[in-house]
Image: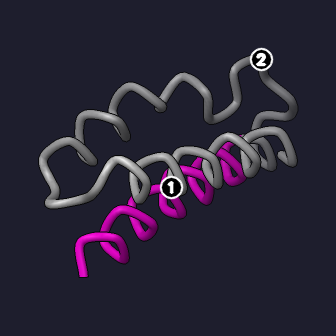
């Protein structure tokens, strides 16, 4: 359950970064600047280290694809 919450938050951050890209054009650190907030959010959830890593790996991959 918490894994889904973590993925949902990561997807929200990516969606917001994509909207910003579409509105303002390319910007350095698109999405990456929110990684600390995502890590803080994930630390408050009941996730294993492996689950946190999977979410962060997906997040970083999504940031690269923006």
Near-viewer residue (23 or 2): 2
Total count of labels: 2
Left or right of 22: which side holds 60? left
> Which of disc 1 and disc 2 is earlier in sequence?
2
Give, as a single range, the part of the protein colored magenta: 1-20
Left or right of 27: which side holds 43? left
Near-viewer residue (30 or 47): 47
From this viewpoint, which residue is outermost toward the bottom?
Answer: 1
For label 1, the residue is: 55
Residue 5 % position (x, y): 30, 71
For label 2, the residue is: 28
Q: Secondary structure at mark 2?
A: loop
Residue at image position (28%, 56%) is 48
Residue at image position (14%, 60%) is 46
Left or right of 51: which side holds 30? right
Label 2 packing within 10 angstroms: few (<14), some (14-19), many (20+): few
Q: Secondary structure at mark 1?
A: helix
Look at the image and say whether residue 13 sits in the magenta stretch.
yes
Q: Quadrant of the N terminus?
A: bottom left
The answer to which quarter of the image holds residue 40 is: top left
The answer to which quarter of the image holds residue 37 is: top left
Near-viewer residue (36 or 57): 57
Q: Nearer the viewer, mark 2 or mark 1?
A: 1
Position of 8 relative to 25 (above/below): below
Left or right of 57: which side holds 9? left
- Majority secondary structure in the magenta region: helix
């Amino acid at each position: 359950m918490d894994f889904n919450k973590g993925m949902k938050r990561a997807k929200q951050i990516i969606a917001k970064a994509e909207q910003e890209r579409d509105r303002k054009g390319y910007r350095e650190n698109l999405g990456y600047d929110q990684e600390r907030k995502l890590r803080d959010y994930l630390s408050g959830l009941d996730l294993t280290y492996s689950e946190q890593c999977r979410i962060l790996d997906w997040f970083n991959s999504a940031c690269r694809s923006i």
